[in-house]
Amino acid sequence: MTNRRDFLRRASLLGVGGALMGRGGQWLAASPVVTRTNAKQLGLQIYSLGRELAADVPGGLKKVAQMGYTVLELAGYSPEGRIGQTPMAEFKKYADDAGLRIASSHLNPPIRGGYTPENLPEIKEFWKKATDHHAAIGVKYLIQPGQPRTLSVEETSWVCEVFNEAGKIAKAGGLLWGYHNHSGEFARVTPGGTEALTGRPGFGRRDPEGTRLIYDLFLEKTDPSLVLFELDVYWAVMGQYDPVAYMKKHPDRIRLLHIKDVAVLGESGMMNFQKIYEVAYANGIEDFYVELENYAGGTQFEGVKGCADYLLAAPFVK
Ligand code: MG
């Protein structure tokens, strides 16, 4: 007997084109139809998988897609054109095979110490090569996640000029260039200073005249047409600043987010992801990348799946 549930199941099969009535009235063979119940766009920074991904890149990326992730942000670029040990074209093919889009990439110029006029040519050469390599596989964003030495207002201003140069190179190649923070950017620097001051100024204490947050100088002294920002919301909190306040104040500059918690998303009491997503959507942000560092509760893959499960179940994530 056909009950209502059977009827609905059949109707839905018809609805998705699983079966068609032939001319003679016979049922044509139905091909299996896979429908995504998850319409959410979930991004993952692959650094989160650590060495576990390197063991089996094609298989690992398929697992990531099965968890519900749809977009990747790369890590581990080398100027030889590899992501970790995998040539970039090959990595792209593995991502394609898994149904994952690669939108962004984290990379740092190989400079030890501070940025200087002397090492600027080397930095520019790095970004030129990186732009070509990433354009070839259709990546949209080049993101620098490492903070160059910034011990004074002057040194920070020079770093901003170097960022602008990187942005120009990426733009010439059709890419967008951005900066990703940790907590160190929420330290303060003074004119002519020799150290960055961490933490908030003590009660009743005054910083020297002209003291500024490094992150504020980055926002102020980089060219908005060349440099955008990927805000790591967790590291902003660790730097004792409010990521939501920054997003509200700089809606045109902060265009990507790192969605990160102490470990698996939503398990600590530190991060207000509902508010973060609400303001991000109001600002038109479309790029969100989950990040998980050393996970003590299991494998990195398990932790990354826990993060996906949290976001898939969260009603505030579109
Ligand atoms: Mg991050």
Image (cartoon, grey):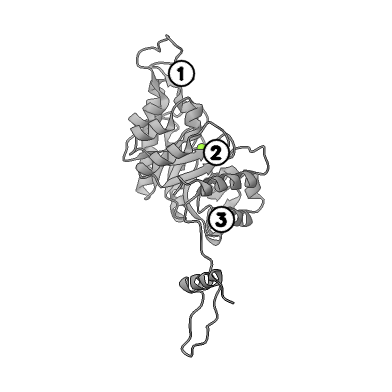
- Asked whether the residues under the numbered discs 3 and 2 touch, taking CB atoms below 8 Å apart as contact, a structural biologist would say no
Give the secondary structure at mark 3. helix
- In the rendered image, the vertical position of residue 24 relative to residue 133, given as above or below: below
Residue 279 x/y as whole percent: 38, 39
Please state if 184 lies on the left or on the right of 305 as rendered.
left
Q: Few, some or many C-alpha atoms within 10 Å of disc 3 (few <14, some 14-19, many ≥20)?
A: some
Q: Amino acid at mark 3?
A: Ala
Residue, disc 2: 266
Q: Amino acid at mark 2?
A: Gly
Give the secondary structure at mark 2. loop
Earlier residue among tags 3 and 2: 3
Instruction: Judge whether residue 148 can be spotted in this image.
Output: no
Residue, disc 3: 65
The quarter of the picture where residue 6 lies is bottom right
Cα separation between marks 1 and 2: 26 Å
Earlier residue among tags 1 and 3: 3
Residue 2 x/y as whole percent: 56, 75
Q: Amino acid at mark 1?
A: Arg
Which numbered tag is attached to residue 200?
Answer: 1
Cα separation between marks 3 and 2: 21 Å
Residue 123 x/y as whole percent: 45, 37
Residue 305 x/y as whole percent: 60, 48
Q: Nearer the viewer, mark 1 or mark 2?
A: 2
Q: Few, some or many C-alpha atoms within 10 Å of disc 2 (few <14, some 14-19, many ≥20)?
A: some
Instruction: Judge whether residue 6 can be spotted in this image.
Output: yes
- Asked whether the residues under the numbered discs 1 and 3 touch, taking CB atoms below 8 Å apart as contact, a structural biologist would say no
* Ligand 1 within 8 Å, label 2 CB: no
Q: Residue at x 49, y 88 (%)?
A: 25
